[in-house]
Image (cartoon, rainbow, N blue to C red):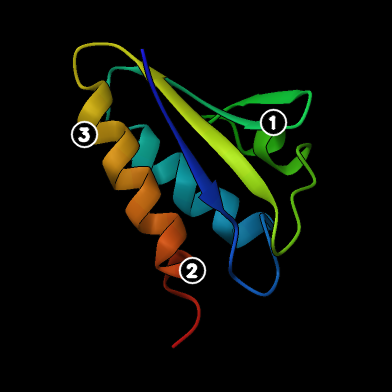
Amino acid sequence: MKEKKVIISNKLGLHARAAAKIVTLTNKFQSIIEIINNDKKADAKSIMKILMLAAPHGTEVIITASGKDESAAIKSLENLIKAKFDEES
């Protein structure tokens, strides 16, 4: 299992469009991928679970992945989050 800490840096945090982009991306991987915000853990392949994290701008989350493509999954999700979900310049 691999994990990476990242900061949600887009203005609106993990809202519906951002969550949808996460789900679209993570469903390309076979690994089990989760996002953790404090004591809340969400399946990164479930839009409803991601929204329930209630992670606003500035929140530090932990991405975990377990499986044969875990490294690629972590890197791809990290890049999406760092790119502010391609919503901001």
Residue type of the residue flagged with mark 3: Ala
Name which residue type carries label 2.
Lys
The residue pinned by badge 1 equals: 49
Q: Give above or below for 69 relative to 16.
A: above
> Which class describes the residues within 10 Å of circle 1: few (<14), some (14-19), or many (20+)?
some
Q: Horizontal placement of 16 versus 82: left or right?
A: right
Q: How many marks?
A: 3
Pinpoint residue 37: horizontal percent, then vertical percent.
71, 35
Query: Which residue shows up at 79% across the image and 37% down it?
Result: 52
Residue with the mark numbered 2: 84
Regarding mark 1 in the picture, which secondary structure is present there? helix
Of callouts 1 and 3, the N-terminal one: 1
The residue sitting at 64% across, 26% down in the picture is: 42
Q: Amino acid at mark 1?
A: Lys
Q: Nearer the viewer, residue 6 or 47?
A: 6
Residue 70 placement (x, y as % from top left) = 27, 22
Check the image and report above or below for 26 versus 2.
below
Rendered location of residue 2, percent (x, y): 35, 20
Residue topped by disc 3: 72
